[in-house]
Amino acid sequence: MVFLQDTNALACKAIPAVLGVSRAHNLEMNSVCVQRKPGEAMGAIVKLNRDDGNGSLTINVEYNQLHSLLVAKWNPNGDACKEGENYSTFPGNTNTLVFKLAEYVENLKRTGGVIPEFVNPKYANEERTVFKSPTRLECMM
């Protein structure tokens, strides 16, 4: 099963390739990424390791949270290029996801299809007193 963001029509060009890779590697879930420049207003795919060393999670981190997370946990320069390179170490999330259908259905049964929602305000000033745009209800893809 493929999910894609309706504002990203070019993602359709990658679907045959990501389906082939997903099947060849027997992946339960896969995500299409692109190169991104540091600081670009695009979520990044990041592997987060637990502080105690017991596991990790590969996840999208929203662009407005990425720099501070990287400064705190990875690099004092945050989302920066490696020397001599033009792109971030962390690829951009295109919101194109592929799921193995049997496992996806099992998760729907287990969760009842419920996905937590949240608000993601965009502020126009440092004090966070003025909104840049109307805040809307969102959920992670």
Image: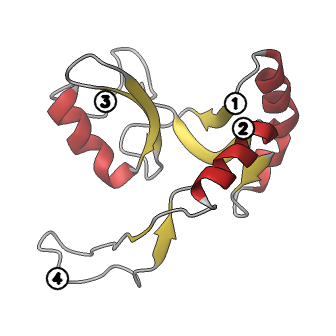
Q: Residues within 10 Å of mark 4 (few under 14, many from 20)?
A: few
Quarter location, residue 21: top right
Q: Which residue is mark 2?
A: 103
| Residue 45 visible (yes or no) | no
Pointer 2: residues within 10 angstroms few (<14), some, or many (20+)? few
Residue type highlighted by circle 4: Thr
Look at 20% across and 20% down and name the residue there. Answer: 52
Counting residues from the N terminus, which is met first, the one under dot 1 or under dot 3?
Answer: 1
Q: CA distance from mark 4 to mark 1?
A: 42 Å
Q: Mark 2: which amino acid?
A: Glu
Q: Is 87 rendered above or below residue 104?
A: above
Question: Does residue 13 appear to the left or right of 44 in the view shown?
Answer: right
Q: Which residue is mark 4?
A: 129
Q: Quadrant of residue 75?
A: top left
Which residue in the structure is indicated by mark 3? 80
Which amino acid, mark 3? Ala
CA separation in Å, label 3 and label 4: 29 Å
Residue 86 x, y percent position in the rendering: 44, 26
Q: Secondary structure at mark 2?
A: helix
Q: Mark 1 or mark 3, which is nearer to you?
A: 1
Q: Amino acid at mark 1?
A: Glu
**Residue 50's spot in the image, x, y percent?**
27, 25
- Near mark 3 (Cα within 10 A), the count class, few <14, some 14-19 or many ≥20, is some
Q: Is residue 101 visible?
A: yes
- The spot of residue 33 in percent (x, y) is 61, 35
Disc 1 or 2, which lies upstream in sequence?
Answer: 1
